[in-house]
Image (spheres, rainbow, N blue to C red):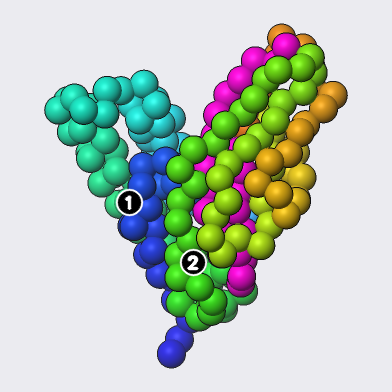
Amino acid sequence: MADRITYGHKLFGHSELITFGYRITGIIKSSSNFPDAPAEIAELEKTLPEYQDVHSKGNKGDKVTSFKLKAFRAKTLGLLAALAEYVTAKANGDPVIMASSGFEMNKARGSRFMKPIEQLNVIIEKPNEAVTQVKRVAGAKAYAHQYTTDPLTSESIWVTKITTSPSYTFTGLKSREKYWFQVIAVGVNDRQTAATPVSKVIQ
C-alpha cells in the first residue's frame, strides 16, 4: 500500500482540532519542503483564532454557539483537507516529505488514535513559576510541556521540556507577563495528542 495521509483528525474534538490546525500551519510555513504554501494557510490562520475564541468563551449549551462551532469545525476540516492534498502533491510519493508536514500517515504502526487531553491545568501559586498539569493519557510514553510568550500565533516559538510525568514546573518566568502553555502527550511511533493552549499571567 502506498504511503498516504490519513484523516484521523476528523475524529478530534474542538480543542484538539484547533491545536492540530495550529500545528499544521506552523510546520508547513516553516518547512523548506513547502516553500510555496497555498492560500489555505492564511485562511486557516485567520479561522483558528476565531474558532478558538468561540470555543473558549461561548456558552456550549447555546444553540447559536453550537451552530458557530459546527461551522468553524467544518471550515477547518475543509481547509486541512486542501492542505493535505497540497502536501500529497508536493511530496510526489516521498514519504519523508509527506510525514514532515505533521499529518498522520497510513503506515504509522502502533496503538489507535490516542484520546484527546481533556483539560490542561496551569497552576500559578508562586512568583515566576507555572505548573502545567494534565491527566495521564493511555498509551503516552512522554509529555512535552511547553510555554511561549503572548500573543499566540502560528509563528510562536515554544520552550519545551520533555518528561515522563504529566506535570512540570516552569521557573524563571517574568512576573506580570502573560504566557501561553500547552502539553503534548507522545505515544509509540510519534503518535501525539495535544491540549488546547491556556494563557496565564505570572505572579
Q: Nearer the viewer, residue 37 or 1?
A: 1
Q: In which quarter of the image is the N terminus?
A: bottom left
Residue at the spot of label 1: 77
Task: Tell me where residue 11 sits by quadrant.
Answer: bottom left
Q: Give the x, y percent position of residue 52.
A: 41, 31
The disc placed on residue 104 is: 2
Residue 121 falls left or right of residue 41: right
Quadrant housing residue 70? top left
Residue at 37% across, 52% down: 12
Q: Residue 172 versus residue 87: which sits nearer the camera?
A: 172
> In the displayed structure, does residue 102 sit left or right of residue 8?
right
Element on which disc 1 rests: helix
Mark 2 element type: loop
- Residue 183 lies in magenta, yes or no? yes
Residue at left 45%, top 77%? 106
Image quarter where the C terminus lies is top right
Q: What stretch is highlighted in magenta?
A: 182-203
Q: Name the kind of residue labelled 2 in the image.
A: Glu
| Residue shown at 75% from the left, 50% from the top | 162
**Residue, far left:** 63
Q: Which of 46 and 190 is in front in this view?
A: 190
Q: Cα distance, mark 2 to mark 1?
A: 14 Å
Residue 76 placed where, x, y %? 34, 45
Q: Position of residue 83 (x, y in %)?
A: 42, 57
Question: Which residue is at 55% across, 55% downward?
Answer: 137
10 Å crowding of disc 1: few (<14), some (14-19), many (20+): some
For marks 2 and 1, the one nearer the N-term is 1
Expressed as whole percent of the image width and height from the top left, the position of residue 16 reads 44, 46
Q: In the figure, is residue 33 to the left or right of 64?
A: right
Q: Which of 1 and 188 is in front in this view?
A: 188
